Image (cartoon, rainbow, N blue to C red):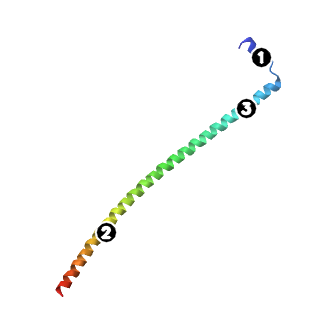
Amino acid sequence: MSANAVREFAEISADEFHTLEEKVYRTIEMLKSARDGRAAAEHESTRLREQIVKRDEELASLRRELGDARREREDVRTRVEKILKHIDQLTEEESAVQ
């Protein structure tokens, strides 16, 4: 420290020092609060990311199920159409015989 800085520091009154000390402590508390807020935000961010991953997995599963259901519906439709054609043929044959 230079001699001028030492003289200026010595000239600070007790009230000024107390005010400065209070500001330093408030700054420390603000820093602690900001760190706690950051930790809480990081925790929430991690939780939300995990939730997004879970929802993405659920969505993929539902899409697969939907695809399977559509294929099954088409299968059933095709089989029903074949049965109806057979019934029509039998009906036509029966009509022709009479």
Q: Nearer the viewer, residue 83 or 9?
A: 83
Residue 55 horizontal side relative to residue 42, left or right: left
Q: Is residue 74 above or below residue 97?
A: above
Q: Is residue 21 above or below residue 53?
A: above
- The mark lying in front, picked from 3 and 2, is 2
Residue 78 horizontal side relative to residue 94, left or right: right
Q: Secondary structure at mark 1?
A: helix
Q: Which mark is residue 25?
A: 3
Q: Is residue 93 above or below residue 78?
A: below
First of labels 3, 1 by sequence position: 1
**Farthest residue toward the left?**
97
Residue 12 horizontal side relative to residue 60, left or right: right
- Residue 51 position within the rendered picture, expressed as x and y whole percent measured from the top left: 51, 50
What residue would you read off at disc 2?
Answer: 77
Residue in view at x 55 percent, y 44 percent: 45
How far, Cα to Cα, is label 2 from label 1? 94 Å
Residue in view at x 69 percent, y 32 percent: 28
- Residue 68 position within the rendered picture, expressed as x and y whole percent measured from the top left: 35, 60
Look at the image and tell me in which quarter the C terminus lies.
bottom left
